[in-house]
Image (cartoon, rainbow, N blue to C red):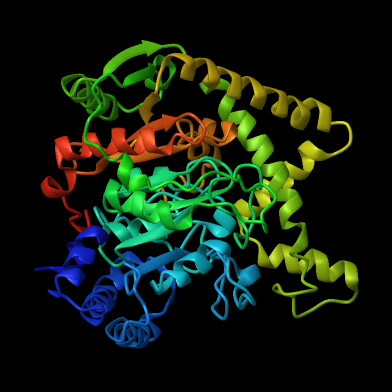
Amino acid sequence: MNITELTVHELQEKLENKELTITDITKAYVDRINEKEKDVQAFVTELTKEAIEQAQDIEKKVENGEIKGKLAGIPIGIKDNMCTKGIKTTCSSKMLENFVAPYSATVVEKLDKENMIDLGKLNMDEFAMGGSTEYSYFKKTKNPWNLNKVPGGSSGGSAAAVAANMVPWALGSDTGGSIRQPSSFCGVVGLKPTYGLVSRYGLVAFASSLDQIGPITKDVMDSALLLNVIAGHDEKDSTSANRPKVDYTKALKNDVKGLKIGIPKEFFGEGINEEVKESLKMAIEKYKELGAEVEEFSLDIAKYALATYYIIACAEASSNLGRFDGIRYTYRTPEFKNLKEIYKKSRSEGFGSEVKRRIILGTYVLSSGYYDAYYKKAQKVRTLVKNEFNKGFEKYDIILTPTSPTVAFDIGSKSNNPLEMYLSDICTVSVNIAGLPGISIPCGVDKEGMPIGMQLIGNRFCEETILNAAYTFEQAIKFRKNYKPAFKLTK
């Protein structure tokens, strides 16, 4: 039995039947990290030694009846933009290279309450700005399916660690597709919840009206399990929704008979790779076989969504990153003559190229004379995007699209062309603009064996609907049984 290939719900079963111990599981993951991290480069901070000690402590407490939770002793990885008390939280930036968080994010507190074991902080694009995890200050994470390829971003470390079986599941954050796109590239399941369902308190902000924390897992059941833990109202987050508690695992009924699925034709047009289209067509046919009602319709937002997203996201990034000034808890330039020089040199040296690019763009669209022409107009288009989705959900239960227009691309092939990199978000950004839930699940592979992701979008707070649709499809095609990462290097 290869412990690290098991899903979390399978690990729970083994623990319950006393086939495995908490220490067995944690040691297996620590060994796997020691074996694969040199190739994949998914971690910024490894906590392997602490994890073993924690596992032994939790195991004793479980045996003594002091701890009873079903997730006690299950390991997890956390994206490095979520504050973890007493542990470095770097956002993969030189600016926060030595920052140790004095408190934990609400989601981390919830994991601690369940007595889960943190295996480490996972690599990401700096301040979550990027689509390939090439913009990390520390390292470039590789895709376990092909080590020449990017894992996607910005939650590339989280997706790669799950795909490589270095963690059983992980937390990521999604501002414009940063959970779903890397999940698509790495052949795992990534869920971006409805805006406000999961607390953002303790998440280092990129774009506050778009950011959302969510699970990256091996299968849909695990996604529902982890959402059960992290969802819920938080008084410390003013945007947190006060909703009734839901057990998302109960929604997984393996039945989509009568489910109405809308296929927006604009998301299958120019720019979408032919192999991606073919894989999605097969997925659509599978849904028809399973009894779902599928219909093509027009969702005429794709051409506006990307520009709208980058104006709003960069404007909010410019505002949020103003706090990193070299004065308080961030990097400070060693050489300066006056206060103005501290600000200028600390920010110039502390931020990477992509972060600077977005700050400059955001400051420009917020500046006097351009605010009305760009930012205000983008907010109006945002309302139009929401309205278009509302119209779609009057007729359909879910909307099905590709997660990404392509499979994972070669490392270095787009990092010098920001516009081309931004275009890889074309299928995902509208979900964040409208504050909707979206899930990416693998639906096939291309001729090179790279995973292809399918995105299912639901109406606000309809996570149960998209989780069941994803689960039913997953059970039908059994992707994990048929395909595995190769860890290969191509010449």
Q: Give coordinates of residue 239: x percent, y percent.
A: 66, 46
Q: Is residue 160 left or right of residue 423?
A: left
In the foreground, 397 or 435: 397
Is residue 18 visible in the rendered image? The answer is: yes
Residue ranking furthest to the left: 1
Q: Quadrant of the N terminus?
A: bottom left
Q: Is residue 425 left or right of residue 261?
A: right
Q: Is residue 382 left or right of residue 459?
A: right
Is residue 299 visible in the rendered image? The answer is: no
In the foreground, 363 or 193: 193
Q: Give coordinates of residue 458: x percent, y percent.
A: 44, 30
Q: Residue at x 29, y 46 (%)?
A: 220
**Which picture quadrant has residue 277?**
top left
Q: Quadrant of the C terminus?
A: bottom left
In the foreground, 230 or 452: 230
Q: Please say if 184 is above or below 51.
A: above
Q: Give coordinates of residue 153: x percent, y percent.
A: 45, 50
The mark tally for this picture is: 0
Q: Please say if 161 is above or below 231.
A: below
Q: Please say if 158 is above or below 62.
A: above
**Which picture quadrant has residue 334?**
bottom right
Q: Residue at x 35, y 49 (%)?
A: 224
Q: Give coordinates of residue 472: x percent, y percent.
A: 23, 35
**Which picture quadrant has residue 95?**
bottom right
In the foreground, 261 or 426: 261
Q: Residue at x 57, y 63 (%)?
A: 106
